[in-house]
Amino acid sequence: MKAKPRIARENWQLDGDTITVFIPMTWKRRGGRKVIIAPDGGDAWAPAKARPDETLIRALARAHRWKRMLEEGTHNSSTELAEAEKVSRRYVNRIVQITLLAPDIVEAILDGRQPKGMQLEEVTGSMPSGWDEQRQRVFQR
C-alpha cells in the first residue's frame, strides 16, 4: 500500500484520511461559565438575540445620574459625590467617563448589541475621547 501524502495549508492539514482544522480561539469565563471567543473578539457561537449586559447598563445609568448631580450642584466635586455614594473618588471619575461614549455605542449597549468581549473595565479604562476612535476600538476588534 502506498503512503498517502501529507498536505498542509495555513489552517488545515491532510494526513492520510484525517483532516485536522486549526481554529484560533480563546476561552474566557463569563457569568460563571466558559465561552469560546473567536479571533474577532466575538462569541463564536453567539445566539441571534440581543444579550443586554446588566453591568454596563447599570454603569451607564449611574454615570449619567452622577454627571447630572455634579452639573446641578447637588455635589460640588467628585470627592463629595464619592463620599455621599460611599465609593472611591477614582471610581466616580472612571464611571462618569462613560457619559462621553459615542451615542451609537451607548445605544448598542442599551439594546444588548455590544460586542461580546466588551467589559466595563474596557469602557472606563483607556477609551479614546473621539467618537470615531471609540467606534473603531469597539466595533472593529
Image (cartoon, helix red, strand yellow):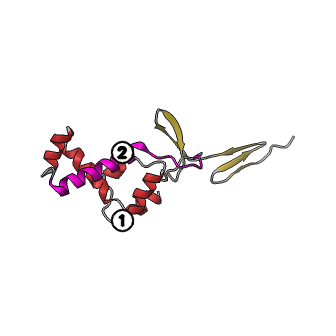
Determine the secondary structure under disc 2. Answer: helix
Q: Is residue 31 above or below residue 128?
A: above
Residue 125 belongs to the span the image colors magenta:
no
Residue 70 belongs to the span the image colors magenta:
yes
What's the CA distance linking mark 1 and mark 2?
A: 21 Å
Image location of residue 108, percent across then percent down: 45, 56
Quadrant for the N terminus in the image: top right
The reply to whether callout 1 and callout 2 are in contact (CB within 8 Å) is no
Determine the secondary structure under disc 1. Answer: helix
Q: Which residue is mark 1?
A: 131
- Residue at 18%, 54% (x, y): give it: 70
- Specify the quadrant of the image occupied by residue 45: top right
- Residue at 49%, 48% (x, y): give it: 116
Report the disc number at residue 58.
2
Image location of residue 79, percent across then percent down: 14, 46
Report the disc number at residue 20.
none
Q: Is residue 45 left or right of residue 5?
A: left
| Foreground residue among 93 and 67 | 67
Q: Is residue 63 left or right of residue 56?
A: left
List the single residue furthest toward the right: 1
Magenta residues, dominant SS class = helix
The part of the chain drawn in magenta is 46-73
